[in-house]
Amino acid sequence: MLGLHALRSHVPFAEASDGVAIHYEVHGSGQPLLLLGGQSNSLHWWDSVRDDFARDFTVVATDNRGTGRSDKPRSPDAYSTRRFAADVVSVLDDLGIGRAHVYGTSMGGRVAQWVAVDHAERVGRLVLGCTSPGGKHGIERGPDVRRALADPTPGAPARALLDLMYSPQWLARNAGPFTTLGDPDMPEYARRHHFRASGRHDSWDALPSIVAPTLVVHGTDDRFNPTANAPLLAERIPGARLHLIPQARHAYFEEFASVATPLVADFLIG
């Protein structure tokens, strides 16, 4: 395995246990930090803040299977949040990284939970952003949100998603392009498999076994993944801290980067 000094010259693919190729990128220097993004999104989810983290950390960002340059298996059984967690550990193995901090948002936060549960020795500090424990204990988005996202009117779901991710004031100042609205080149079957994997996530019984120091971050105005999930996670994970960002929606890490990035970086540095 390669040490950190060899990262920049290494071919950026790792092989998962089932042979699926997982693409990743490495930026910056310092302690390793694994960034895990949202459902049906590639590593470009992090484009707006990646370089800020790379000033202090060796940032490793991955394309989940089904997205970006990673392989896109057709079987639905090849997709689960626990499987995604095993994939990113394969990336750490490929890079020769024994332990990394882990920051996951949205579905990436669900994946990060399994990394911390199943591979505790590989996690330094853990940040769970705008995410949920899933299962019967998780708080689901409301029916109004589900209706808006399923509206068959051309362009309506995209407009609804933008409204869930960002405040109107921020959208008025930022015309895009937006890198948090899904991988545009993702096959439809893989998109369905991601949706299914995220929907079947349930880490509730395992959360008390997490030993990594944990920070839970959420926007107070998040209706896409309701804010009520944040205290559930913080109370379930031993010693976890909770920080709510006022007025922030689902993409708090981008719109409120001036608050969220220093908050997370300071926690990770410890």
Image (cartoon, rainbow, N blue to C red):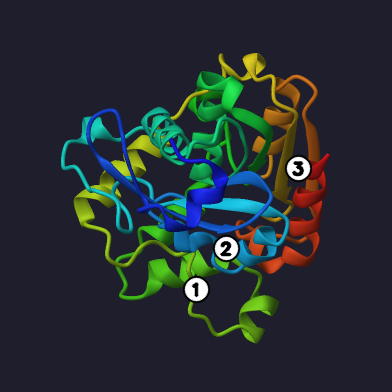
Residue corresponding to mark 3: 268
Q: Mark 2 points at which residue?
A: 165
Q: Is residue 225 visible?
A: no
> Where is mark 1, residue-wise?
178
Helix, strand, or loop for circle 3? helix
- Position of residue 161 measured from the top left corner of the image (x, y, whole percent): 48, 64
CA gap between label 1 and label 3 equals: 27 Å
Under mark 3, the amino acid is Leu
Labels 2 and 1 touching (C-beta < 8 A): yes
Residue 26 in sight in this render:
yes
Tell me the crowding category of disc 1: few under 14, some 14 to 19, or many 20 or more residues within 10 angstroms, Cα based.
Answer: few
User: At 35% across and 32% down in the image, what residue appears?
Assistant: 80
Residue 62 % position (x, y): 44, 50
**CA separation in Å, label 2 and label 3:** 25 Å
Which one is nearer the viewer's eye here, 173 or 31? 31
Depicted 127 relative to depicted 266: above or below: above
The answer to which image quadrant residue 76 occupies is top left
Q: Distance between the Cα atoms at labels 2 and 1?
A: 10 Å
The reply to whether the C-beta atoms of the residues labelled 1 and 3 are less than 8 Å apart is no
Residue type of the residue flagged with mark 2? Met
